[in-house]
Image (cartoon, coloured by chain):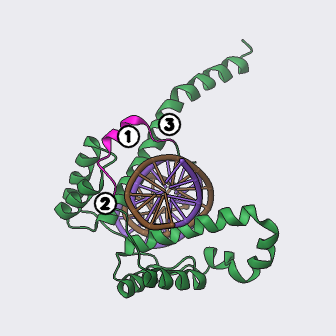
Chain colours: A green, B purple, C brown
Amino acid sequence: MAKNNSLNKTTARNHRRSRTKFTEDQLKIFMKAFNQKPYPGYATKQKLALETNTEESRIQIWFQNPRARHEVQKRSEPEKDLEASQDQDHPEEKIHGREDRRCHTSYTSSQLHTLITAFTNNPYPGIDSREQLAKEIGVPESRVQIWFQNQRSRFHVQKKRELDEPLEQKQDQEQNLCDEGV
DNA sequence: TTGCTAACCTAATCACCTC
DNA sequence: GAGGTGATTAGGTTAGCAA
């Protein structure tokens, strides 16, 4: 699914956020929460953030990683998983019992203007640029990161659609010729 | 050098809002 | 309802750091 990052992308990127070193106590709290609820809602993540003195966005990332590792492990040990799945997996929770989400962020036209300008200049901003932007428009850095992710995603879809359009037109023309018996 | 894992990515989907 | 868009997810890669 994930594609290899091109050289251009790498050079366009400033740099990553410095790697967080969680303490043993923090990890203990995260693990306990993960065992109880691998898909915590916003309120739970906020609570954990307060309890461990960590940013909520770091909690979100932290939960993503063990979930992914858990899935990889499940695939490599399918027979073990059969036993474990009954008490450790919560597919029903994943689908139906989802907790609350973060409130929908609404951007003003001037905030969007700033974001779009920045996106045009660099669609892969590093942590410094994201933080600067966040400060400029008055939203958390994690929201800026999500905005860029969504924007890139939709940009790729739009590009693909534009590339597919001439192909579809050609296919339509060919179909018409077939229908006419040419 | 290697293994672990935080950070980050895309693509798909969910869910809310506006029209 | 449909379309736009922010939030969340799965599943993958990249890169920092300790052993």
Q: Mark 3 lies on which chain?
A: A
Q: Is residue A29 above or below residue A56?
A: below
Q: Is residue A43 above or below residue B16?
A: below
Q: Compute the Cα span from label 3 to label 1.
A: 18 Å
Which image quadrant is residue A22 in? bottom left
**Residue underneath mark 2:** A144
Assign a secondary structure to mark 3. Answer: helix
The numbered mark, 2 or 3, whose residue comes first in the sequence reads 2
Q: Which chain carries label 2?
A: A
Q: Compute the Cα span from label 1 to label 2.
A: 18 Å
Assign a secondary structure to mark 2. Answer: helix
Q: In this view, does A177 lie to the left or right of A38?
A: right
**Residue underneath mark 3:** A160
The location of residue A49, given as percent across then percent down, is 38, 81
The location of residue A5, given as percent across then percent down, is 45, 41
Nearest the camera: A86 or A20?
A: A20
Is there CB contact under 8 Å for labels 2 and 3?
no
Q: Mark 1 lies on which chain?
A: A
Inspect the magenta stretch and tell me whether residue A105 lies in it: no
Is there CB contact under 8 Å for labels 3 and 1?
no
Residue at 19%, 57% in the rendered image: A110
The location of residue A54, given as percent across then percent down, is 35, 78
Q: What stretch is highlighted in magenta?
A: A4-17
Q: Which of marks 2 and 3 is in front?
A: 2
Q: Which of the labelled discs sits on residue A9, or is there none?
A: 1
The numbered mark, 3 or 1, whose residue comes first in the sequence reads 1
Which image quadrant is residue A140 in? bottom left
The numbered mark, 1 or 2, whose residue comes first in the sequence reads 1
Amino acid of disc 3: Lys
